[in-house]
Image (cartoon, coloured by chain):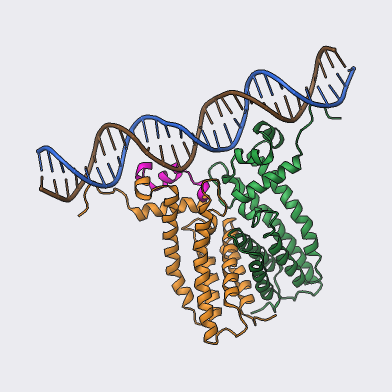
Chain colours: A orange, B green, C brown, D blue
DNA sequence: ATGCTTATTTATCGTTCGATAAAGAAATTG
DNA sequence: CAATTTCTTTATCGAACGATAAATAAGCAT
């Protein structure tokens, strides 16, 4: 049994609140005051649980990526490469405009550029984004092996294209685009995707 | 003739230096110390010339958008809608990986999310991005009128798609993707773009 | 030359930043 | 129960933040 006074707050719940702050204001734009207020705890509790502001972001990113990876199970289960692309982009149109969350994507909003002393943050976000792209690529490699994608298709390029559109949709959503606008982008992208690959 | 002591620095040159700082570190990540050091001037000179940190960003954005609009002249002069799309995306692949500038796009890197007291910054950036999208849309409306684009095509959706891919390419470039990777995304996007529009 | 006007320099303003030391509270252990 | 351990509270730390007041310097006007 663990000794000492038990923690009075739920780590995951506090992490969800911190995630929302980072999501809405970015890493540099999120102050300790904003974070502790949203989490309902005080600085020493935050530092005891997460080590630092950067540690808190990483914990929030891990939680975000975990949710996302659960979702990727559904996406990757699409029967064809085209189905996978469609599921990927359309589900992003939904999630990036979910009223339960800030608009856009934490991995884009969180901090593409940061100030001195936070140089590692953009790399953290990029690494998480790269995971999704890698998942898509592996799925497309498989699709090529099974003949679902033609011999001259490029799984890596297709995955990068989808990942790039997803990031763009995050930017679009963050500036207030509605769900239908994102669906429209998804549809055009899928159209591009599903046609014969060689120009 | 103007009276008083003349300004000892070139406003545009200082603005270029400030632009680079905002580009690389974002609005919140750029401190007055970083900005004044890069610009080679001291705070009072900065405030006299630009009013505030936010005023400095707006001036830098205007300068950035002006350069871009010059470039858009070339893009929009493409003979067909497909040419326009190709020029647009391929030129972005070049500009977003130009070693003379920070990687990516100021209008994306500059601040998708900001802290308290800087809430207007993301809107400023979004407005500039929207200008490009509007230019593309108008060009595609014209293309539809002249029969270059088919009757059932959607100029607005196509413009939004290209603008979204451009934003995504900005995110991609900011995380270190090389020029060829961006070109690849551009090629896949154009392929999507140039095919028959109805699924 | 003297006065007027504007810019630059120096030195700082009050606030907020991320992060902690020290004291008090709540649990298990013996 | 007292001792130990861990967390929470209170109060604050030094540094950096964005922004300026006051003094000095450099140009026109007469």
Quarter where residue B180 is shown: bottom right
Determine if the magenta segment contains residue A28: yes
Q: Is residue A198 left or right of residue A131?
A: right
Determine if the magenta segment contains residue A7: no
Question: Residue, x 55% and y 85% (percent of image)?
Answer: A148
Does B11 sit above or below residue B20? above
Does B12 sit above or below residue B48? below
Identify the image quadrant of the C terminus of chain B.
bottom right
Is residue B122 in sight in this rendering? Answer: no
Identify the image quadrant of the N terminus of chain B.
top right
Query: Residue C22 in the image: x percent, y percent?
Result: 30, 32
Q: Is residue B1 left or right of residue B109?
A: right
Question: Residue, x 55% and y 75% (percent of image)?
Answer: A85
Magenta stretch, residue numbers: A26-45
Camera-nearest residue between A26 and B128 = A26
Query: Residue A21 in the image: x percent, y percent?
Result: 47, 50
Magenta stretch, overall SS: helix
Question: Residue, x 77% and y 71% (percent of image)?
Answer: B83
Question: Residue, x 63% and y 39% (percent of image)?
Answer: B53
Query: Residue B50 in the image: x percent, y percent?
Result: 69, 37
Quarter where residue B140 is shown: bottom right
Residue at the limit of the structure toward the bottom, as seen here: A147
Query: Residue A172 in the image: x percent, y percent?
Result: 60, 60
């Amino acid at each position: 049994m663990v000794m000492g006074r038990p923690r009075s707050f739920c780590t995951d719940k506090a992490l969800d609140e911190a995630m929302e702050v980072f999501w809405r204001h970015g890493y540099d734009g999120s102050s300790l005051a904003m974070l502790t207020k949203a989490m309902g705890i005080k600085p020493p509790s935050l530092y005891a649980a997460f080590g630092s502001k950067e540690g808190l972001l990483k914990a929030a990113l891990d939680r975000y990526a975990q949710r996302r990876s659960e979702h990727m199970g559904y996406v990757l289960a699409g029967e064809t490469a085209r189905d996978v692309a469609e599921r990927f982009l359309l589900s992003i149109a939904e999630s990036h405009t979910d009223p339960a969350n800030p608009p856009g994507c934490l991995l884009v909003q969180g901090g593409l550029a940061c100030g001195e002393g936070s140089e590692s943050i953009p790399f953290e976000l990029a690494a998480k984004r790269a995971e999704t792209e890698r998942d898509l690529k592996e799925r497309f490699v498989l699709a090529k092996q099974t003949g679902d994608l033609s011999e001259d298709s490029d799984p890596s390029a297709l995955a990068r294209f989808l990942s790039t559109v997803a990031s763009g949709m995050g930017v679009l959503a963050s500036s207030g685009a509605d769900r239908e606008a994102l669906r429209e982008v998804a549809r055009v992208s899928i159209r591009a995707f599903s046609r014969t690959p060689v120009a």
